[in-house]
Image: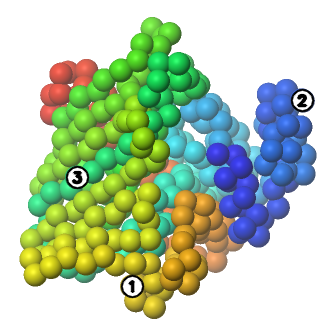
Amino acid sequence: MGRVHAEAARRAGASVVAAVASTPEGADRAARTVGAERGYPDLDALLAEAGVDVVHVCTPNARHAEAVRAALAAGAHVICEKPLAVDGVEAASLADAAVAAGRVATVPFVYRFHPMVRELRSRLADGQAGAVSTVSGGYLQDWLSRPTDDDWRVDPVVGGPSRAFADIGSHWCDLVEFVTGDRIHRLSAQTTTVHARPSSRPTEDAAVVQFATEAGVLGTLVVSQVAAGRKNRLHVEVSGTEASYAFDQEDPERLWVGGRGGNQVLVRDPQTLSPAAARYARLPAGHAQGYQDCFDAFVADTYRAVLDEDRPDGLPTFADGLRTVRITEAVLRSAAAAGEWTEVDR
C-alpha cells in the first residue's frame, strides 16, 4: 500500500520526501521501494527532520494510533489506512485529536472515487430509484483461501480483533452508506474461521450480515477472504421501485440500471455522466480507469483540502473511519451472541 500511496502523492504534485521503517536497513529499503528521498529508522526522527506536510500512515493496524498522534502533534496532516484503529474508543480519540489539531485527516475509502459510484450516488439522491427497499452485495477475496496462506493481518495482536470485516467489509459498508445517504442502524452477523491458524484468538475468514438502515431499508452482505477465484470483488445492488442499480468494482467502467420497461448498462463517459461523476472521469470514454485512478483522486482531494483550496464533496474523513470501526464492533458483538440483532453505536 505504501507504493500505491506514494504513486498517488506524486501524481497529485507532491514530493515523497521520506519513508520510515523499524531499522536503518529497512528504512533504506522502504525509501527505495516507494521512491522517497530518504529513509528514517523511526517516525520521531522523520517528523523532526523531514519537514513533511502530510504523513501517510500505512503501518499494521495496531500501530495506527501512535503514528497518527505523533503526526498530528508535529503539525502534519494525516492520511491513515483503514481500519482507523482497532477499537471504537481509540478511533474516537483519533477523530477528536484531528479536530482539535485543526488538521486534515482522511481515510482511503477510495471506492467512493469511481465515477460510476458517483453516478449511482447522484441518481439515488435525485430519487430516480423511487422507494429503495433492499441493498445487497459483498466483498470477496481469495488470498487467504489456503491453510498455508499467512499475513500479519491474521494475528489479532497486530491486526486487531476483526480481520476480514475490518479489512474489506468496512469498505463495503462505507460505500453503501455513501451512495445511499442512509446509515446502517442495526444488524445480525455470523462469522466463521475456516482455517485454524496459530492464535489464541483467531480472527474471522468470512462474515454474513443482515442489517436494517435508519430509513428502514433491509440489506445483506457477504464478506470473505477465502473465496477461491475472487480477487477484489466488491459489488453492491440497490433495489428500488422505479429503478435498481448494480456496481461491481472489478468492472468499474459500467453501472447496471434495471427498470420495469427494460434494463441498460451505462458506461463511463464524461459527456453523459452527471457533473458529480464527470469530475472524476479523468480519461476519455473507452480508456479504462481503475483502482489507482481512484486512489489518485482521493489523495488529490485530500491535498486540495490541505491547501485550503476547498473541501471536496465526499472526502472520507476520520469521522468516516470511526463509523466503520463502530460497525465492525457491532458485527463482532452480534456474532459473539449467536447472531443477536445489535445496534450500531453512533
The residue type indicated by label 3 comes to Ser
Question: Is mark 1 in CB contact (under 8 Å) with mark 3?
Answer: no
Q: Earlier in the sequence, mark 1 or mark 2?
A: 2
Kindly identify the residue that appears in the image at 37 percent across and 59 percent down: 248
Kindly identify the residue that appears in the image at 90 percent across and 46 percent down: 38
Task: State the image coordinates of residue 178 (x, y, percent, origin top left).
Answer: 35, 61
Q: Which residue is mark 2?
A: 25
Q: Which residue is mark 1?
A: 274
What is the number of the mark on residue 136? 3
The residue type indicated by label 2 comes to Glu
Element carrying mark 2:
helix
Q: Earlier in the sequence, mark 2 or mark 3?
A: 2
Look at the picture and state if 192 lies above or below 323.
above
Task: State the image coordinates of residue 253 (x, y, percent, origin top left).
Answer: 44, 71
Q: Quadrant of the C terminus?
A: top left
The residue type indicated by label 1 comes to Ser
Question: Is mark 1 in CB contact (under 8 Å) with mark 2?
Answer: no
Determine whether, in the image, residue 101 is placed left or right of residue 130: right
Pick whichever, 265 or 12, lies toward us. Answer: 265
Pick whichever, 35 or 307, lies toward us. Answer: 35
Q: What is the crowding at mark 2: few (fewer than 14 residues within 10 Å), some, or many (at least 20)?
A: few
